[in-house]
Image: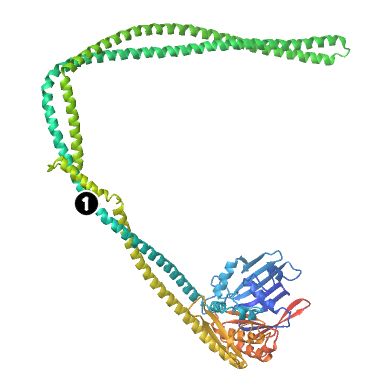
Amino acid sequence: MLIREVILENFMSYEYARIPFKPGVNVVCGPNGSGKSSMLLGISVALGQSYTERSEKLSDLIRWGKDQGRVTLVLDNSLKSGRRPYPRIQKDQIFLTRSLRRDGKYWFELENRAATKADVKRLLSKFGVDPENMLIIMHQNMVEQFTVLSPQEKLRIVEAAVGFESYRQNVLQAQKKLSRILSQEESVEKLLESAEQTLTYWREQYDRYQQKKQLRMKRRFLERELAWAEVSKREKIVTDLKEQIQKKQNENLQIENETKTINGQLEELQRNLEQSKTEWKRLLEERLTLEREKAKHESSVVMADQTLKETESWAETYHEEMEKYLDKIRSLETALHETTNPIDLKTQLTEIKTTYKNLESTWTQRFNLKSESLKKSVENSKEQLAKLDSQISDIKANTDHLNLEIEGATNDVLDRKISRALLQYRKENLSEALEKLNKELQIALTDLQETIKEAEEMGSRIVPMKSIVDILDEIRLTDGHLAALADVSEDIERMYESYSKLYLELKEKARLVAENREKAMEEVKTRMEAWRTVIQNLLDHVSLKYQGILSEAHAIGDVRLINGQDIEAAGLEIFVGFKGGKLVPLSAYTQSGGERSIATMTFLLALQQHVQSPFRAVDEYDIHMDPKNRELIANLLVSSVRGLDAQYLAITPSQVTFTGKDVHIITVQNVEGTSLIKEVA
């Protein structure tokens, strides 16, 4: 059992109602418009449904004239097999409330505390209730709606009701995984094919590259042999030049000694000259500093004179202002002798005289102070200028003396350079032949060193077996062969190794992907078989039960799984045949309203023992049935729930159908627009 009691407050036609529910079948009876369906609608709203066929907005379900409605479910949380369905709340009863306001605000309360829809879903999942599933809660007209569903939709609804959704999800996950692996395998195969073609090309280029490497090795050996042949040739030239130079060296030795003596004297003179020049520069910088100081003081004198002139101009302005004050004083004194009421004029005269004295004292003091300061500044600047003129004169005398010393030292340096030039001229005349030989020797030695260095870069020394001409001929022949391989890049070996490695990696990856594909296909097959097995077993049991119930209504039927090899296309097809007719699919176009109701209810009853939800409900399932079939379905409904830990709510306008049966009957009447509840049994 799930619901112990339903409390409706200002909900649709209910002002306030407490409706107790019991285990087993609860039957709600009453005339049309009495509020029977509103009871199931209230339960659905409390369980979290947001949209109903009765209204597009939940606020439309609030009782007319009221601003707020409320539906409360008292859920059974008592111990079952030593454990509560919702162990987070250690109470036998759980109060789940949903409040609706006219302004469109809705909220849940769980045990009188605010809760989210996610909290409610979590709670219902613990009880195993899915209020959105048509087979769990079937409102008005849903019996008809079930018949127009596609076979695929019917199958999914059945899977959700009996708790087999996980089998479908397992298959879909495995198929999705297989699809990814197949896509990966296709990509790897394309890459492998492309890599194989590329590797073939680079293998051909690699063979040409090896041939080119051999030719280069041969050419390097020939270059080495040629280099050491050049070394031998230059060594002979150096030996001949050294013998000739030895004869001229003694003649040149004396001239070199004389030249060294003159060079020493010349260095001493140049040092003295540099010192004199340094001292001259120092004096020049000192003079420049004094000249700048002099210019600064001269500028100060000019500025002070200018300021004195401006001060005198201010004094004239001051005297003009003071003269204006004197004119006012004279004017007031004259007016004072002529007036009969001199009090105000005396006051003005006193104030102007006071102002005059203050201005005279202030202006005189400022003028005198500023004039004295400026005059003192001019005197100081003139004293400094006299001192600076004396210092500049002394520096000029010292500079003239240094100029004479520098001129004498320069002449001495020139004399020594002339003497050295004469010695050098004599040396050139005496050792012209030696210099020529030394130059030739230097060039020869340089060429020899460069040749040896180049030869050593080619490799260690070897004894040439061929002449230079023969070696050059063989190099030209080798270069011809290399020119034919000029298009062979140095990166070929790296590219070949890279693509070889890539090809092997792709082959290994292709092998792993193939293994994964086989495993994934096996997994899909296994999961598909598990899904098909449980679904087929379920439908087999349901079909037998379905056939047995229909036989009591003198009809035949069958429940089949169609397209069972494809889980996406797989569906549930319900067949029925009335009055000796053949089996035909249940649809909105083949059977009458009563036949559709009987077939749909028969299927639901056959499915009952497999449904996991502890609460199921169906509204006005028998509206199109004749009295005999109503009685039959009522009996089957009661018997199908008997023995199950389930609570069933059946809404019907006919109480007679369930009278005398083991059910809990609740009657509803509408009195002056208000639904009233009466518990019969």
Query: What is the quadrant of the C terminus in the image?
Result: bottom right
Identify the residue at image location x=21%, y=47%: 477
In front: 675, or 85? 675
Amino acid carrying mark 1 in the image:
Gln
x, y percent for residue 509: 35, 65
In front: 586, or 102? 586
Residue 55 shown left or right of residue 207 in the figure = right
Say above or below: 383 vs 441.
Answer: above
Residue 527 shown left or right of residue 578 in the figure = left
Q: Residue furthest right?
A: 340
In front: 408, or 141? 408
Instruction: Specify whether residue 477 is in view.
Output: yes
x, y percent for residue 437: 16, 24
Identify the residue at image location x=64%, y=66%: 107
**Mark 1 sits on what residue?**
214
x, y percent for residue 151: 56, 79
In front: 452, or 386? 452
Task: Give neighbour class at mark 1: few <14, some 14-19, many 20+ (Cα, 10 Å).
Answer: few
Residue 507 shown left or right of residue 583 in the figure = left
Mark 1 falls on what kind of element?
helix
x, y percent for residue 57: 68, 68
- Give the mark count: 1
Say above or below: 487 vs 429.
Answer: below
Instruction: Specify whether residue 644 is in view.
Output: no
